[in-house]
């Protein structure tokens, strides 16, 4: 969907539809399944409460019944709308209010920041009592908190929902609302996309705040640099990401003409027009080389030229893997087994270890067809046999990138009127130097290591990509049969 200027009614509908995501369905299903205690992990109380209300109102329209929504905080006590419900600021009194509510009344109770009181054994006991009681009633208790702090006694009683940050459509609707309310000039096309995307990763309030600050600081316009600067301040508080400010330019990099040309082609692929053409959003590059060769400088220049935040992630996967207790299915990948720590390979860490070899001829033909179709083209219009034959020794990723590269070349030459052809794909394949050639010895060593330590991920095929068929013979070595 294109990000464009929208009238109020359309923008509000987009925002409402954007909020009907998987998490909202999850909340609805938990309520209908009579989960009495639902712990929502989020710092966005207002947004979560609106989501709960939207779910309830949708059910009310469908089933023609009414559900009361009570809210509680230690500062306001229990309220029904704006109406106070007696002396209920104390958390114990608030929980007793829930226990004593009419059994036949449909209601939800939204408790804000109750986590601060979960070390109190009376609070914990009352919550357990509520959990037992509400399973037989049409009521649900929501605990909204930015911190996950569930005592062991409640671990089996509480369903946890991690509420996600706003998605692109929600940020776009916030952008529209700020623009309408301030009368600001709304940018269009790719400039608008950049402004909205710059606020991804922020809460709804944070996104609204950075848009408003940009308008104030610039005198009425949306400036990406101002938005990124404010986002940097917010990101630094996390302690997990490091935000780089850079004014480097591509002209500051000497040489590297092939890399810079490649990056130039990819820069235009962030537009909506490029996506409609079939181009994927660029995912990244791996730069390998000697220290001081310009790798870090190039990264900083790309961040500045593309007007995207440059972040460094801190953290250890192996530490998380060792300590995790949540029901997470991990799919890990590795290219060099020599650098894997022994604890990663111990028995029981994973259910199984698979070896993914280079694709066979039939697999390559299937891969080519998949990626051509994924770009909105008809595979039947291409010479799949020739393309799969000429891609011998290439990985699926290399074949995909050859097709993508052919798309970039065609778009660079002819724009949206360009036509992807077999010849274009074959030309890209010819320019591709596969890993099977540049890392021949390492791949052979990896295959040898996996023979006795891993299961093959593909069925064998008697052709160029699989084990070669051959005559079985006996050779006498030193007079002995071998």
Image: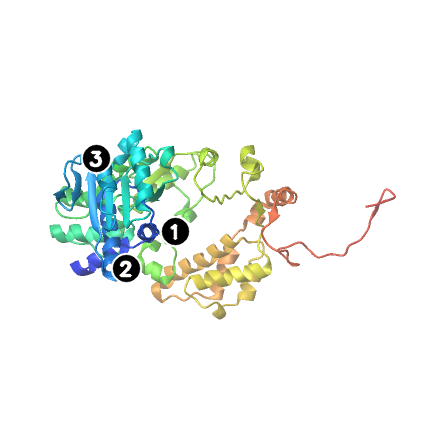
Apparent side of residue 37 relative to residue 433 in the rendered image (left or right): left
Q: Residue at the spot x=16%, y=42% of the render?
A: 79
- The answer to whether any part of residue 59 appears in the image is yes
The answer to whether any part of residue 192 appears in the image is no
| Quadrant of residue 338 within the rendered picture | top right
> In this rendering, which labeled residue sits more in front, label 1 or label 2?
2
Residue under the image location 56 percent in, 59 percent down: 363
For marks 1 and 2, give the CA distance: 18 Å
| In the image: residue 478, left or right of residue 437 | right
* Relative to 191, residue 303 above or below: above
Q: Secondary structure at mark 3?
A: helix
**Observer-nearest of 172 and 204:** 204
Q: Nearer the viewer, residue 296 or 369?
A: 369
Q: Nearer the viewer, mark 2 or mark 3?
A: 3
Q: Position of residue 368 (x, y in %)?
A: 51, 61
- Give the residue pinned by disc 1: 282
Q: Callout 1 environment at 10 Å: few (<14), some (14 to 19), or many (20+)?
A: few
Helix, strand or loop at disc 2?
loop
Tell me the number on the disc at residue 116.
none
Q: Secondary structure at mark 1?
A: loop
Drawn side of residue 393 relative to residue 250, left or right: right
Q: Are marks 2 and 3 in contact (CB under 8 Å)?
A: no
Badge 3 is on which residue? 93
Q: Is residue 222 left or right of residue 416?
A: left
Image location of residue 259, percent across then percent down: 42, 47
Sequence-wise first label, 1 or 2: 2
Front-most of residues 36 and 151: 36
Q: CB of mark 3 within 8 Å of CB of mark 1? A: no
Q: Which residue is mark 2?
A: 2
Mark 3 or mark 1, which has the lower sequence index?
3
């Amino acid at each position: 969907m294109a990000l464009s200027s929208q009238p109020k009614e359309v923008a509000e509908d987009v925002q409402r539809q954007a909020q009907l995501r998987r998490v909202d369905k999850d909340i609805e299903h938990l309520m209908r399944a009579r989960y009495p205690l639902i712990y929502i992990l989020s710092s966005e109380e207002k947004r979560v409460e609106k989501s709960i209300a939207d779910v309830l109102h949708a059910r009310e329209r469908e089933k023609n019944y009414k559900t009361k929504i009570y809210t509680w905080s230690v500062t306001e006590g229990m309220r029904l709308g704006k109406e106070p419900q007696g002396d209920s600021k104390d958390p114990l009194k608030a929980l007793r209010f829930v226990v004593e509510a009419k059994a036949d009344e449909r209601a939800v109770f939204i408790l804000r920041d109750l986590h601060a009181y979960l070390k109190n054994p009376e609070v914990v006991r009352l919550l357990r009592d509520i959990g037992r009681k509400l399973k037989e009633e049409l009521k649900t208790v929501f605990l909204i908190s930015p911190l996950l702090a569930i005592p062991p006694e409640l671990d089996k009683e509480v369903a946890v929902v991690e509420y996600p940050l706003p998605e692109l459509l929600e940020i776009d609707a916030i952008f529209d609302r700020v623009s309408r309310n301030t009368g600001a000039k709304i940018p269009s096309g790719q400039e608008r996309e950049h402004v909205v995307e710059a606020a991804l990763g922020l809460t709804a309030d944070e996104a609204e705040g950075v848009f408003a600050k940009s308008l104030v600081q610039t005198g009425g316009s949306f400036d990406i640099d101002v938005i990124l600067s404010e986002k940097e301040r917010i990101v630094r508080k996390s302690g997990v990401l490091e935000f780089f400010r850079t004014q480097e330019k591509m002209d500051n990099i000497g040489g590297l003409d092939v890399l810079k040309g490649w990056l130039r082609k990819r820069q235009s692929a962030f537009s909506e027009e490029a996506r409609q053409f079939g181009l994927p959003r660029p995912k990244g590059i791996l730069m390998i080389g000697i220290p001081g060769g310009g790798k870090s400088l190039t990264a900083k220049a790309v961040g500045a030229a593309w007007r995207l935040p440059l972040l460094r992630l801190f953290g250890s996967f192996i530490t998380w893997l060792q300590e995790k207790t949540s029901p997470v299915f991990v799919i890990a990948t590795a290219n060099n087994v020599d650098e894997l720590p022994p604890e990663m390979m111990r028995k029981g860490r994973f259910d199984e270890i698979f070896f993914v070899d280079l694709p066979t001829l039939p697999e390559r033909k299937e891969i080519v067809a998949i990626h051509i179709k994924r770009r909105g083209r008809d595979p039947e219009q291409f010479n799949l046999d020739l393309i799969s034959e000429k891609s011998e020794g290439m990985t699926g990723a290399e074949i995909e990138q050859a097709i993508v590269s052919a798309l970039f070349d065609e778009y660079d030459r002819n724009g949206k009127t360009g036509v992807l052809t077999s010849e274009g794909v074959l030309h890209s394949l010819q320019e591709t130097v596969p890993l099977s050639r540049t890392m021949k010895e390492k791949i052979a060593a990896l295959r040898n290591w996996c023979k006795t330590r891993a299961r093959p991920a593909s069925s064998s095929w008697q052709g160029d990509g699989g084990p070669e068929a051959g005559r079985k013979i006996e050779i006498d070595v030193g007079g002995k049969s071998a």
